[in-house]
Image: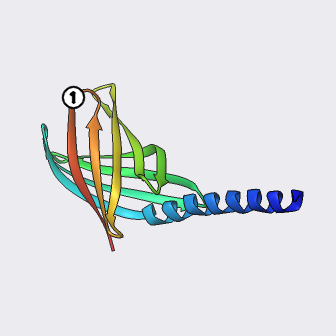
Amino acid sequence: MKSFLRFAFLSSLFLFGSLGSAHAAELAGKWSAEFDSQIGQQKYVYEFKGSGDKLTGTATGDRQGTKSEVELKEIKATKEGVSFVELLKIQDQEIRIEYTGKFTSDDELKLTRKVGDFATYEITAKRMK
């Protein structure tokens, strides 16, 4: 009986670990988004890289001709969806931008982009081929 319980426990750990890796693989790659905001048209490219269940990423933005690149933080990809944080520095002030969303297809993410306490936007990011 002990060996069966041990097998069941180890199998469930493997299964849940594999699911995290599968969702990380879904997010890996480059995604582009364009949207209107209070400061005008913005263009972004999000790039995610995964190794196992560890994800890293960057966001390259173009706002009114001003380009920036930042490292994304707190990246998570689960069966419920994705989330990550962009820490943007504007005029010596750091603004926390929180993203949450879901895959609507293999090539599309619907995201909510919450910019500090200032604004919230619904955006669509499309996988770049």
Residue closest to the eye, 95 or 52: 52
- In the rendered image, which residue does mark 1 sit on? 118
Q: Position of residue 23 (x, y in %)?
A: 49, 61
Q: What kind of residue is marked 1?
A: Phe
Q: What residue sits 82% from the left and 57% below the top?
A: 6
Q: Position of residue 57 (x, y in %)?
A: 45, 52
Which part of the image, by quadrant, shows the N terminus? Answer: bottom right
Q: What residue sits 32% from the left and 25% below the top?
A: 93
Which part of the image, by quadrant, shows the C terminus? Answer: bottom left
Q: In the rendered view, tell whether residue 90 sits above or below residue 110.
A: above
Q: In the rendered view, tell whether residue 26 sits above or below residue 89.
A: below
* Direction from residue 31 to residue 43 in the image, left or right: left
Q: In the rendered view, tell whether residue 8 sits above or below residue 94.
A: below
Element type at marker 1? Answer: loop
Q: Quadrant of residue 32?
A: bottom left
* Direction from residue 28 to residue 91 in the image, left or right: left
Q: What residue sits 54% from the left and 60% below the top?
A: 50
